[in-house]
Amino acid sequence: MIQLSSIEKVYRTDSIETLALTGVNLDVDRGEFLSVMGPSGSGKSTLLNIIGLLDSPTSGNIVLAGEKVASYHDRKLAHIRNQKIGFVFQSYHLVNDLSVVDNVEIPLIYRSMSGKERRQRALAALEKVGLSARTKHFPGQLSGGQRQRVAIARAIVGEPEIILADEPTGNLDSVMGQEILAILKSLVKDMGTTIVMVTHDEPIALETDRIVRLFDGSQVN
Ligand SMILES: Nc1ncnc2c1ncn2[C@@H]1O[C@H](COP(=O)(O)OP(=O)(O)O)[C@@H](O)[C@H]1O
Ligand SMILES: [Mg+2]
């Protein structure tokens, strides 16, 4: 589902050059749940952003679901991102002045779909994460764990093949973290979703199929 070969990422500013990733090779199978671990600054978010087509590598190749994305232009990348990839972030990234259900509908706005169908799909996604009773609330009225469940509903509403999660349990206590992990695992089991999750939490990582470790931009396992 995800194939990375010889990925290198260099960030250049006027005076500084940072090698964020080097020599990264990674194959993730369809329906695999992979964790990425490593100290702060080791390149985890950079790796996730490159897989998610939010950033491009300085060199190397990426194939996502059979598509050689390295050669694609921005509009086509945005289309693949919208169709195939769902994102979940540590700090939820919800829109505070939109209701829960309106937040979940956001990825569907870019698809040709009636308002009624958007609403139905958003409500179904909220049901999957156990938030049917909170659809008209606003993010500020929810706990951290509930906000992250909204973010997961938004990530899955377009039925993406790949979910990328950057420290999704990082702001949550361990009980809520386990709830989020259980939801992610159910996506893998029930829908065959492929998940790449960055985490600092070893017990959570140990519950996934495989752990890849980064140190100073390189894989260490
Ligand atoms: N936009 C950027 N510009 C310059 N340097 C960056 C940028 N993003 C990340 N870096 C650098 O790349 C390295 C890896 O960062 P990151 O992928 O965010 O690490 P992690 O997520 O593991 O904490 C760090 O040294 C960081 O400072
Ligand atoms: Mg990071």
Image (cartoon, grey):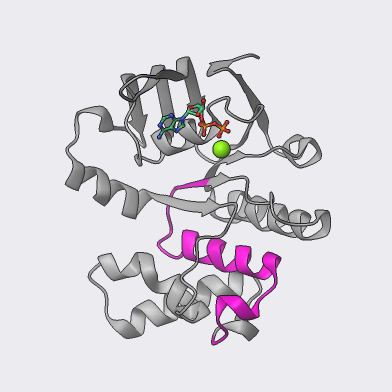
Residue 203: in magenta span: no
Q: On the rendering, which quadrant does ligand 2 occupy?
A: top right
- Residue at horizontal 26 percent and vertical 65 percent from the top: 110
Q: Give the percent coordinates (x, y) of residue 112.
A: 22, 70
Residue 159: in magenta span: yes
Q: Is residue 17 left or right of residue 34?
A: left
Q: Give the percent coordinates (x, y) of residue 25.
A: 47, 17
- Residue at horizontal 37 percent and vertical 49 percent from the top: 84
Q: Quadrant of residue 73?
A: top left
Which stretch appears magenta?
Answer: 136-164
Q: Is residue 94 above or below residue 33?
A: below
Q: Is residue 204 left or right of residue 13?
A: right
- Residue at horizontal 63 percent and vertical 76 percent from the top: 131
User: Is the N terminus in the top left, top right, bottom left or bottom right quadrant?
Assistant: top left
Q: Is residue 24 above or below residue 76?
A: above
Q: Is residue 57 left or right of residue 37?
A: left
List the single residue furthest toward the front. Answer: 15
Q: Is residue 76 above or below residue 24?
A: below
